[in-house]
Image (cartoon, grey):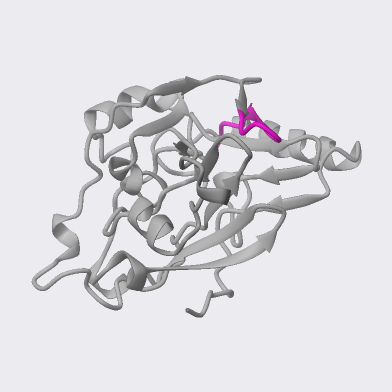
Amino acid sequence: MSALEWFAHKPLGGGIFWIQERFYESGNRANIWLVRGSQRDVVIDAGLGLRSLPDYLRAAGLLAPADGAEPRPLLAVATHVHFDHSGGLQHFEEVAVHSAEAAALLRGDNYEAVTWLSDREVARPPQPGWRARHFRVPPVRPSRLLQEGDEISLGDRQLTVMHMPGHSRGSICLHDKERKILFSGDVVYDGSMIDWLPYSKISDYVASCQRLLELVDRGLVEKMHICQNKRFYIHA
């Protein structure tokens, strides 16, 4: 199966694209976001990695520069290292993750990545003979370690890192302050709170949720792109 078959996308306007893994049919399936800038493009979360996301972005024309210019640099940012977000990082040259989870990513720690993929969740195997029991998140060396307050510059837009632990110890959100848009990662998703995983911490999760509410109450966030929409699918 090609990358063009495995993924699908939907443009949301303003240089933002929503991407899904079409044949990963699970409540754990993470939304993937491409945010295009004038000088750099950013992918927020990278999916399982069963097919190359950069290959898809190129084949689908989503990285095509204007007027024959050189392609913009592409950075993959993991909102945290759980398998459905970090498995695809292996296909990127530039990878960023919060420093609290950098060591887990570097050693391919599938305990911290909570890898629990099953055959029934993959509607079409990516290749003949593929089995979920062989799936692992491979070691990836991050090229950038993120901290609270760091800014990721795309040229004409800035994404500010917000450390929001609770679901995991290195969970982050990315805040486009100018446009009042928040990319929430697994701090916000469709479903009950998952606060019982390795390195989850309920008190941290409560504090992170209170912080989100304050952002909304102060008018600093008007739109949120969340991790999972279990009821919505992109039709290729």
Residue at (41, 72) in percent of width and height: 22
Residue 190, horizontal then vertical, whole percent? 61, 62
Task: Give the residue drawn at x 46%, y 35%.
Answer: 73
Is residue 158 highlighted in magenta? yes
Q: Is residue 35 shown above or below 111?
A: below
**Which of the pair 52/156 is nearer the observer?**
156
x, y percentage for residue 227?
56, 54
Location of residue 11 in the rendering, given as x and y in whole percent from the top left corner: 62, 64
The residue depicted at 13 percent of the width and 67 percent of the height is 130
Image quarter hosting the N terminus: bottom left
Please give left or right for residue 31 compared with residue 1 in the image: right
Seen as rendered, the residue at the extreme front is 67
Q: Is residue 114 visible?
A: no
Q: Toward which corner of the image does residue 5 lie, by quadrant?
A: bottom left
Q: Is residue 95 magenta?
A: no
Q: Quadrant of residue 57?
A: bottom left
Q: Nearer the viewer, residue 197 or 162?
A: 162
Taking the image as shown, residue 185 lies to the left or right of residue 219, namely left
- What's the magenta region? 153-166
- 49 left or right of 235? left
